[in-house]
Amino acid sequence: MATIRVRNTDEWITDDEAVRAFLANQGVYYEQWDLFALTPEQSNSFSLGDTEKEAILTALAPQIEKLAKERGYVKWDVIALSNQTPGLEDLLKKFEQVHTHTEDEVRAIAAGSGIFIIKGSAEVGYFDVNLRAGDVISVPEHNPHFFTLTDERAVVAVRLFIDPAGWVAHPYADIGFEKA
């Protein structure tokens, strides 16, 4: 289950109903998937080749296809990030810049954990959504945000796209944003 930290107040939201209500109020889609179809190896491996990524997509196909049909996604893939990922620090530098997209950014966490930092309403400001295996999130199009790893430094996520081009970021300058 996801947890939230509101950066302006350092308030933590950990109750399932409160997390869902907060995210809905901020226009962020959230649901949870049952990952029973994944093998223990798939749930604990973070260095994946194409065959392993395809196996995860196959195992989660019913949930992926349902979400794709409901929300108009036409392409999906798997991304795996960990200390074993070549060029991890460069990838994180790219992901950790505040940016927007011309479509919503969707991630279904299959293993590990990650954090989306999202710009909320004027009274909320930026908030962190700490995601774990089973969490599915969609950051609305044109909404400033970025993604990073937790201290675990390992995540496997299914990414879903409306645009066949995939992940295309547009930098967003926000002088009031502080990373910490």
Image: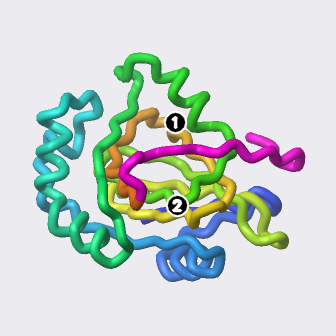
Give residue 4's quadrant in the image.
bottom right
Q: Is residue 165 magenta?
A: yes
Give the class, few, some or many, for how many residues have Cα within 10 Å of label 1's Cα (few <14, many ≥20).
few
| Quadrant where the image shows the C terminus | top right
Q: Is residue 16 left or right of residue 55?
A: right
Q: Where does the image place residue 89, in percent across and percent down from the top left?
A: 53, 22
> What amino acid is labelled 1 in the image?
Asp
Please report the bounds of the magenta region as a residue range: 163-180
Q: Where does the image place residue 128, in percent across and percent down from the top left?
A: 63, 55
Q: Where does the image place residue 162, in percent across and percent down from the top left?
A: 40, 61
Give residue 124's quadrant in the image.
bottom right
Residue at the location (38% across, 41% down)? 155
Q: Is residue 29 above or below residue 37?
A: below
Find disc 1 in the rendering and name its residue: 151
Q: Is residue 133 left or right of residue 41?
A: right
The chief SS type of the magenta part is loop
> Which residue extends farthest front?
164
Find disc 2 in the rendering and name its residue: 103
Q: Is residue 22 magenta?
A: no
> What amino acid is labelled 2 in the image?
Glu
